[in-house]
Amino acid sequence: SFSKTLVLQNVNACLPSGSYIDGDEISLSVGKVFQICGPSGSGKTSLLQAIALQDSRINYLGADAGYIDPQSMRIGYSLQNNSYFPGSIYENITLELDGRSINQERLRKVMSVCQLDCLLERTDLTIYEEIGGSRKDLSGGEKQRIALARALFNAPDLLLIDEGTSGIEDGLETKILQEIVENFPNTIILLTSHRELTYSAVNKIQIRRDLR
């Protein structure tokens, strides 16, 4: 739907009253990580939700293709909470519950990118086993890595991460972001985080209070 750049216009219309982004336009490029920054309550999550739900007030433009129908875009969305449901890792990533065949190569790719192979080693699980029991309990960060793999599984044009790496250790978070950039070069990554990212190549987008 777009080749290298996605421009979002009128994004300020979607933020809570009293908050806005410096300028009402955001330019995002594939193969890069963008972090929305701002104090608590400034509208970071509201912005991601508006983009994910394709708010009609936002204009989606491609630098080389003009207007883009947001319905044509593949959007992956990873949240801080509600990131894991009862079942196997396979079911959580692919959302396939009826045994239909899926792209095994893509499954291996997202598991590698999200560092899930070491999770299987730690828990002595297979991806088809249902999680349960104290031996197989997962940490919050491990659940977030599974949710991130699910958001990546369909190779999205735009990956939205709303505090979806908050439970992952800093060094591992950096490694995962690097792996996403390297393995999904045609994906734009837009995220929020309350902490300072150790990933050095992040591009920051500032949200601030409207004092007018």
Image (cartoon, rainbow, N blue to C red):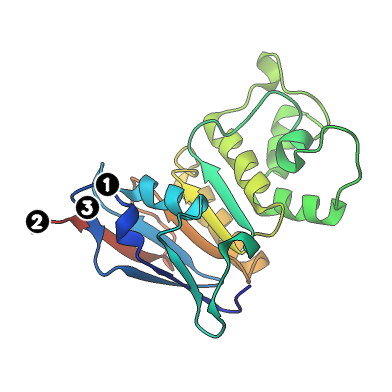
Number of other residues with Cα within 10 Å of mark 2, as a class: few under 14, some 14 to 19, many 20 or more: few
Q: Earlier in the sequence, mark 3 or mark 2?
A: 3
Q: CA distance from mark 2 to mark 1?
A: 14 Å
Q: Which mark, residue 16? A: 1
Secondary structure beneath dot 2 equals: loop
Q: Position of residue 72 (x, y in %)?
A: 64, 64
Q: Measuring 42% from the left and 62% from the top, which residue is drawn there?
A: 58
> Which residue is labeled 3 in the image?
19
- Is label 3 in contact with label 1 (beta carbons under 8 Å)? yes
Task: Characterize the local packing of mark 3: few (<14), some (14-19) or many (20 or more) Cα atoms within 10 angstroms.
Answer: many
Q: Position of residue 84 (x, y in %)?
A: 62, 31
Left or right side of 146 for 64: left
Query: Mark 1: which amino acid?
Result: Pro
Q: Helix, strand or loop at disc 3?
A: strand
- Reading the image, the residue beneath label 2 is 211
Residue type at mark 2 is Leu
